[in-house]
Image (tube, rainbow, N blue to C red):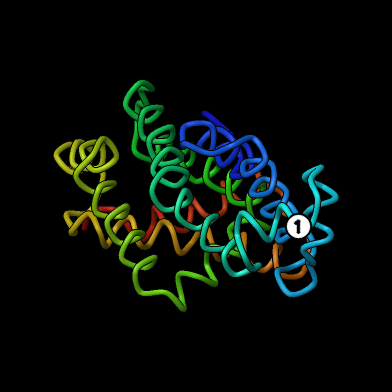
Amino acid sequence: MVHNDIQTLFAESLNELKLTEKQKAVLNASLKLFSEKGFDRTSTSDIAQLAGVSEGTVYKQFKTKEGILTAIIGPFIQQVMPKAATEFTNEVTHTSYPSFGEFLHAIIKDRMVFALNSMPQLRIILHEVITNQAIATGFSHLFENLIVGPLGQTLKHYQEEKQLVDWPLDRIIRYVATTVMGYVLPAALLHGSVDIEHASREATEFLLKGLKPA
């Protein structure tokens, strides 16, 4: 499956916007530094140095660090996360899995790899989701699109094949997502590591027991 990380998708998304090269450099540098050092510990001087521009240019383009963060969040919600979801769901529709168990293991392993590779950037976005209603709404719409899109259709197929419990799709997706994050978040917060193969198989075994039709 596709494993583009958040930083790569963000850079690609900026190329699709009407931004100057200096603006793109500042935003790419800011996301990298916010991810590595944290928002509060990153200075505009740090951003300017990594972006290869003057500190005055940073202030001229975005006024404040908060302005930079706002400029980062927009592309995330409108382009980066939908693009990540599209890459993922396109792969789902073009790969055939003989059983729901094999399908489930594949998507769990894929999302674990993606989340771990992108966790520094995701931490920034998750904080904004908690504090910004507009951003939370954007994620809600993304979740709804997953349900009505290829992923939802694939889950319906396994329900029709009697391999998956006949629950609402949003409930199933929520259980899978929270199980994946249960492995990923502790490792990310504690800067630990995850044995992806072991964790993905363990999570699959756990979920199959709960999602098996009665």
Decide if residue 54 is on the left or right side of residue 11. Answer: right
Label 1, on which residue? 56
When the figure is inspected, residue 144 is found, relative to residue 83, above or below; the finding is: below
In this view of the protein, which residue sits in the foreground, 8 or 213?
A: 8
Q: Secondary structure at mark 1?
A: helix
Mark 1 Cα shell of 10 Å, populated few (<14), some (14-19), many (≥20): few
Decide if residue 67 is on the left or right side of residue 160. Answer: right
In this view of the protein, which residue sits in the foreground, 161 or 83?
A: 83
Measured as percent of width and height from the top left, residue 32 is found at 72, 51
Decide if residue 2 is on the left or right side of residue 102. Answer: right
The residue positioned 69% from the left and 48% from the top of the image is 26
Measured as percent of width and height from the top left, residue 72 is found at 55, 55
Image quarter of the C terminus: bottom left
The residue positioned 22% from the left and 54% from the top of the image is 169
In this view of the protein, which residue sits in the foreground, 122 or 165?
A: 122
Decide if residue 100 is on the left or right side of residue 61. Answer: left
Instruction: Give the residue type that dot 1 points to.
Output: Gly
Measured as percent of width and height from the top left, residue 69 is found at 58, 63
In this view of the protein, which residue sits in the foreground, 9 or 5?
A: 9
Measured as percent of width and height from the top left, residue 43 is found at 79, 67
The residue positioned 68% from the left and 61% from the top of the image is 59
The residue positioned 59% from the left and 37% from the top of the image is 20
When the figure is inspected, residue 89 is found, relative to residue 196, above or below; the finding is: above
